[in-house]
Amino acid sequence: MNSALCRDLGIEFPLFAFSHCRDVVAAVSRAGGMGVFGAVMYTPEQLRTELEWIDANCGGKPYGVDLIVPTSIQRQGSSLSDDQLLAGLPDEHLAFVEATLAQAGVGSDDLDERRRAMLHFSHNLDSGGAEEMLDVAFSFPIRLIANALGTPPQIMLDRARIAGVPVAALVGSKKHAERQVAAGVDILVAAGGEAGGHCGEISTMVLVPEVVSVAGGTPVLAAGGIVTGRQMAAAMAMGAAGAWCGSVWLTTAEGEPSQVVKDKMLAATSSDTVRSRSRTGKTSRQLKSAWTEAWEAQGPSPLPMPFQSLISEPALARIEKLAQGGHQGAAELATYWVGQGVGLMNQMTSTAEVVQEFKRDYLEAAERLMATLED
Amino acid sequence: MNSALCRDLGIEFPLFAFSHCRDVVAAVSRAGGMGVFGAVMYTPEQLRTELEWIDANCGGKPYGVDLIVPTSIQRQGSSLSDDQLLAGLPDEHLAFVEATLAQAGVGSDDLDERRRAMLHFSHNLDSGGAEEMLDVAFSFPIRLIANALGTPPQIMLDRARIAGVPVAALVGSKKHAERQVAAGVDILVAAGGEAGGHCGEISTMVLVPEVVSVAGGTPVLAAGGIVTGRQMAAAMAMGAAGAWCGSVWLTTAEGEPSQVVKDKMLAATSSDTVRSRSRTGKTSRQLKSAWTEAWEAQGPSPLPMPFQSLISEPALARIEKLAQGGHQGAAELATYWVGQGVGLMNQMTSTAEVVQEFKRDYLEAAERLMATLED
């Protein structure tokens, strides 16, 4: 594609794949897009292992890493020991999770253990932990580093500058975008309210032109609801330099959810998602399930990040495991982050095929628009 | 433009302007788009007067009419006399409105009178009233008739068929679209959750391709957040046959809001709207103001349509009048329906200039997309 961003990053097609799954990341990069590995749930050692695999399997093509290093969260977690973190979880929340699992016959005997195993998540969000993650990321020839929440801290910007790696940051409003441009971010990801995972309220159709209008020369990637090439073309007609997609990879053969969740997503309409603070403490869009419904109907008020994740993730990991094993109650509870674009994800396919289909569909959309201008 | 829909309707550019203001309707039609007059708040006599004016001022170009004739509402209003309707309004709601006005120093002495003056609104929603409105509409050479909520009743479809007038209907989900296509609607208006006025939750970026996928040969107009030609181009790249816009006309010289509300809209960001049932009883998107905040914070539960309108509209009409006269408390309360696109409406202009700017911006967007395909 004729695109300054593609030339700068050494990619063929400006489709960015955010994924927690290394197979997706490598497959998208091999197919001409750019895979971006969502690393926040991993330990530094795990991140090293995953990036080694990606580096060996991406065919020498560019790939990136996505972290969460927001300033406000650094302050919260950094002074607490593991035991303090765990002791600070309210009984009300723990009891609600146990009751919700019990009602579905899922049980909760390994939750403590699972909770301890994911303490590194909150560690990743404090400044020491974030630096360890940056050490690992920059020890690989990454071509992009992204910050998923808030303005990247100066250390991230400085290290990226030294390494010659562009920094991307997600924004949910024009005001965020102005702040990020002022901070020196290289690529803005304008994430509309229809996006899976953390999201604001401004829709992609409005947010993209708004962010482009204040971006100056900074390239803008459109995110939120985009699961087809025609939507990518739409975003680029509005001035975006590419698309940043997370949801569409979830129903590929490589995608990380269990087959149970994949099947739910393939059957879901665009009305089957919900924005809720019940997973991470910040508003994130998820597939509706018995779990999200229980939280919406009668759950306690979600805790701030990272505490709410220590409440929800261990339970959801257990649910996912049991659902995979055929447990009916667990299958009803099972959920995952996904955007409204899930309504357009109706067929299981491979990651490489998604990229090829994006290219075909993008071309058709551009031709459709051109045809309206013919005499 | 090379477009089957333009040829069928006899227009030059598939930009549809929904407006309660006859000046906007006529100006858009004259400029090559199609003005569609939102008639639901008018009496049949007023509708006749307005359409006579439009017919005399549209330069012989096609124009349309938009009504609300949903089946579920017909049942609710039709058996009640005016006095029964008024007597059915709960004291709690009336008292809340009075208190909210009093707090802003607005007073409420003419609300009863204003309420009686708008009883025709609920009459328009019952079957007898709707037929009177259809009588008036079809006595003019309209080129489009639209139903704003739900599937058009058979009588509307039949009369349109006889008159050779295409019927458009607004849809907020794929399921609605399937139902409307089955009912025989000629044009679908896919209205995303970012739209002003009545709206669902699915964003335009997702809803348009979803609706197109089930529309078969039925043309789809994209609505929701669209206030620029680049967004119209985006929607058409996704397969829409045109754009249906309501908000963008509000800040034109011709637009119906007071200058106070226009100034608020020009200053607003895309975050300054709220989805609320407090205006009509159904969820509609409005400009945030002291009025919407009062309802969200402590208002009683909104009544079903048309009762909630009998609560809110008389007060809002009084607010608008006092705001126009420079009353500070009224200015803070003043609000109107508007979509998230309000964040991109930053300059007062004329209706004709908006249409011309749409055309220029559409062309630029199409060229931008084409340029990505060059070697």
Image (cartoon, coloured by chain):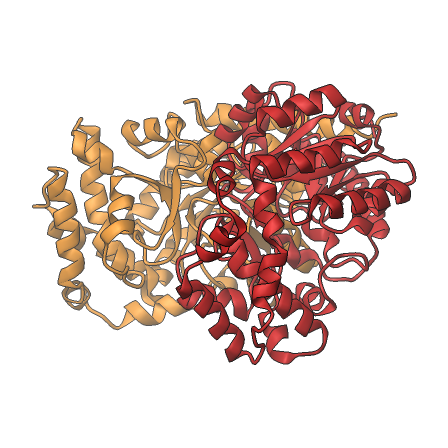
Chain colours: A red, B orange
Name the quadrant of the N terminus of chain A.
top right
Q: Residue at x 59, y 74 (%)?
A: A332
Q: Is residue A284 above or below residue B373?
A: below
- The spot of residue B290 in percent (x, y) is 25, 40
Q: Position of residue A33 (x, y in %)?
A: 81, 39
| Residue A343 left/right relative to B150 | right
Give the residue drawn at x 36%, y 66%: B73
- The vertical placement of A191 against A106, above or below, is above
Q: Is residue B184 visible?
A: no
At 32% from the left and 66% from the top, the residue drawn is: B128
Which quarter of the figure has residue B184? Answer: bottom right
Which of the two residues, A127 or A300, is positioned nearer the viewer here? A127
Quadrant for the C terminus of chain A, please: top right
State whether residue B213 is above or below residue A38. below
| Residue sitting nearer the eye, A130 or B227 | A130
B324 or A296, which is in the foreground?
A296
Q: How many marks?
A: 0
Viewer can see residue A10:
yes
